Amino acid sequence: HVPPHRHRGGAHRRLEHTTGRTGQEKSMAYKVAVLMGSPNDGEKMAPVAETLERYGVEADVRVMSAHRSPALVARFVTGARDAGYSAIICGAGMAAHLAGAAAAHTTLPVIGIPLSGGAINGWDSLLATVQMPRGIPVATVAVDGAMNAALLVVQMLAVNDPELVQALEEHRAEMVPRWRKADRRKRPRLATEMPILSSLSRPSSAICSGVATSDSSEW
């Protein structure tokens, strides 16, 4: 038995509540199982728990192998819904069958993260994770795409949770200033090295008139 390492975040936030006949509110936090095929995958999988924590979602991080401990995987995943899990995220490398093995034993959403490494550096794990047979889906993110796997789960949970919707929208909004800053910093150098980018980056009205605008802060 591998002891779980739990990551709890945002405990003060009520993610879901129901009102009983007595009028008493009951809070219930979302819980997501995060399975990795090897303890060596910890660093690559770390963004999963970190991202879930940001949104107040509990991550129960476990180490299980579809090949070395198949009975453990089957037992855990089969009971996952009754144990209160909302989704399962699986990360594995090389012959990455962990997500597929999990999906075969549950109707909970399963998200697969192909991990890099081995002789062909992630191509094998990508194909092993994404090429599932009809009827047993695994939502597969990019190689080493741990953060996106967590965000995908949060988006699923947000379907009926306005608080999570707001948190996701705020996260998206936080990206914009950083990218604008990077754009302003890089644009002069790129325009010098590749003049065509300078004309393409101007507003269409300026291109048509042949006059560049002096202030691009609003577009």
Image: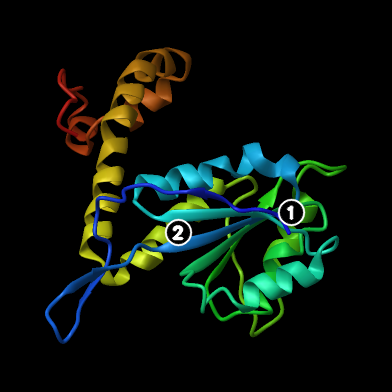
Q: Residues within 10 Å of mark 2 (few under 14, many from 20)?
A: some
Visible in this render: residue 180?
yes
Vertical placement of 135 versus 123: above or below?
below
Residue at image x 21%, y 64%? 162
Q: Viewer-proximal residue, 119 or 165?
A: 165
Residue plotted at (52% across, 72% down)? 109
Q: Position of residue 120 (x, y in %)?
A: 83, 44
Task: Please name the residue that numbered disc 1 is placed on.
Answer: 37
Q: Residue at x 28, y 58 (%)?
A: 164
Label 2 element class = helix
Q: Is residue 190 above or below residue 66?
A: above
The amino acid beneath tag 2 is Leu
**Residue 91: where, in percent of width, then height?**
66, 54
Location of residue 209 (image quadrant): top left
111 or 68, which is in the foreground? 68
The local crowd at label 1, few if under 14, some if 14 to 19, many if 20 or more residues have their Cα within 10 Å, is: many
Indicate the quadrant containing the N terminus: top left, top right, bottom left or bottom right: bottom right
Q: Amino acid at mark 1?
A: Gly
Q: Position of residue 53 (x, y in %)?
A: 40, 47
**Numbered badge on residue 152:** 2
- In whole angstroms, how far apart are the C-alphas of marks 1 and 2? 20 Å
**Marked residue nearer the N-terminal end (1 or 2):** 1
**Which quadrant is the C terminus positioned in?**
top left
